[in-house]
Image: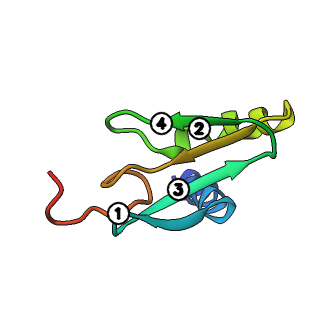
């Protein structure tokens, strides 16, 4: 059981290391982007995060596009301010 936990932790750490922490509107968030071409913005829904787009972002970059995903407040690696519901 520990092996899968360690593997999951490694995958999440790799995702965190591939992106950057940013602030928008005074709220801390996490942004992951790859590629240099025309941007393709990936926005997650409820209960999602940028983590769900990690493979797609890489594929977009391989195809000459710029894949971009970030975590909305309260999800993924973003902050969850007390005043957010």
Q: Alpha carbon of mark 3 to alpha carbon of mark 1: how far?
A: 34 Å
Q: Where on the picture, by quarter, is residue 62?
A: top right
Residue 70: give x, y in percent of width and height. 51, 49
Give the residue pinned by disc 4: 43
Residue 13: give x, y in percent of width and height. 60, 63
Give the residue pinned by disc 1: 25
Give the residue pinned by disc 2: 53
Judge the density around disc 1: few (<14), some (14-19), many (≥20) Cα neighbours within 10 Å.
Answer: few
- SS of the residue at dot 3? helix
Residue at screen point 74% across, 48% down: 34
Q: Which numbered disc flags the more N-terminal residue, 2 or 1?
A: 1
Q: Which numbered disc flags the more N-terminal residue, 4 or 1?
A: 1
Horizontal side, residue 14 vs residue 70: left or right: right
Residue 51: give x, y in percent of width and height. 54, 45
Question: Which label sits in the foreground, 4 or 1?
Answer: 1
The reply to whether discs 2 and 3 touch (Cβ–Cβ < 8 Å) is no
Give the residue pinned by disc 3: 5
């Amino acid at each position: 059981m520990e092996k899968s936990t360690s593997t999951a932790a490694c995958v999440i750490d790799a995702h965190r290391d591939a992106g950057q922490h940013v602030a928008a509107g005074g709220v801390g968030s996490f942004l992951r982007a790859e590629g240099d071409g025309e941007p393709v913005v990936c926005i997650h829904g409820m209960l999602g995060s940028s983590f769900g787009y990690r493979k797609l972002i890489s594929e977009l970059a391989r195809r000459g596009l710029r894949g971009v995903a970030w975590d909305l407040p309260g999800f993924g690696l973003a902050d969850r301010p007390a005043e957010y519901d």
